[in-house]
Amino acid sequence: MKPENEKPPGKDLPTTPPSVELLLEKIRLGQKPAVETLLDRHREPLRRMIGLRLDPAIAAREDASDIVQDVLLEAHKRIENYLKNPVMPFHLWLRHIAKDHIIDAHRRHRLAQRRSIDREQPLVRNGLTDQSSMEIARHLVDGGITPASEAVRKELAERVRSALDELEPDDREIILMRGMEQMSNQEVAEVLNLTEAAASMRHLRALRKLKLVLAPETENG
């Protein structure tokens, strides 16, 4: 006989979160709570994506989280239209909405603060942390940088950010998508309207350019 307090097998096992596809199907069936669950799941990836691209002069006035909230509100209003014609994966659809809101933020602040924002500003300093900068560096310079001190790590992280600032916008964008947002080559190809082969080649070229800016002696030696 089983002990009286024994729990059924598997009762305390963590449940697997529903997939995006399942949540979308629930929304199609009219289950409104699934909308909030779906959008909340994408909140942090959107915040990271927006933070990486928000002009520092604007980020000082408008927090990336506020823009994320606007993106999610718009997505909530438009999700029925998306379900009628899902031409791309849901997270890429959200990304397109976010890109429009980033452009709108730049336009608003450019009109309000022409003197300080019209100048060309680096676009990656606000969201690219020391840790993420170091991850890029490890993949580019001799495959394994292990700086001994915090000061050296911070210096290297700053070099990576400065190197990214020097790249052409297209090169910087594809490195951010692949390296920081962890997008697949297929997803990048879809966002940029390229073949997968072309997207892969563009990424490799961008990495070579970044490596040359970050450590020219490696390329020349």
Image: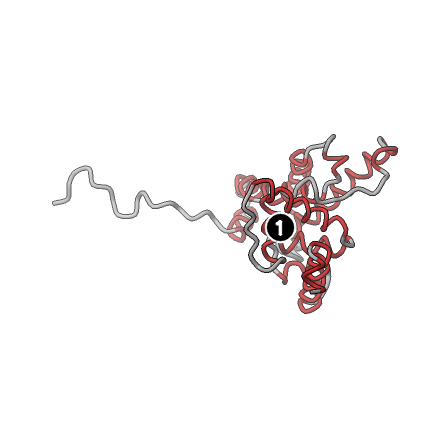
Residue 211, image x and y in percent? 69, 58
Q: Residues within 10 Å of mark 1 (few under 14, many from 20)?
A: some
Residue 108, image x and y in percent? 81, 35
Residue toward you, 85 or 148: 148
Query: Which corner quadrant holds the C terminus?
Result: bottom right
Q: Residue furthest left?
A: 1
Residue 16, image x and y in percent? 42, 48
Q: How many marks?
A: 1
Coloring applied to the structure: secondary structure
Residue toward you, 192 or 157: 157
Left or right, 159 with respect to 14, comes to right
Query: Which corner quadrant holds the N terminus?
Result: top left
Residue at the image position 73 percent from the left and 61 percent from the top: 193
> Which residue bears the numbered disc 1?
180
Left or right, 115 with respect to 154, comes to right
Residue 111, image x and y in percent? 86, 34
Q: Amino acid at mark 1?
A: Met
Residue at the image position 67 percent from the left and 44 percent from the top: 158
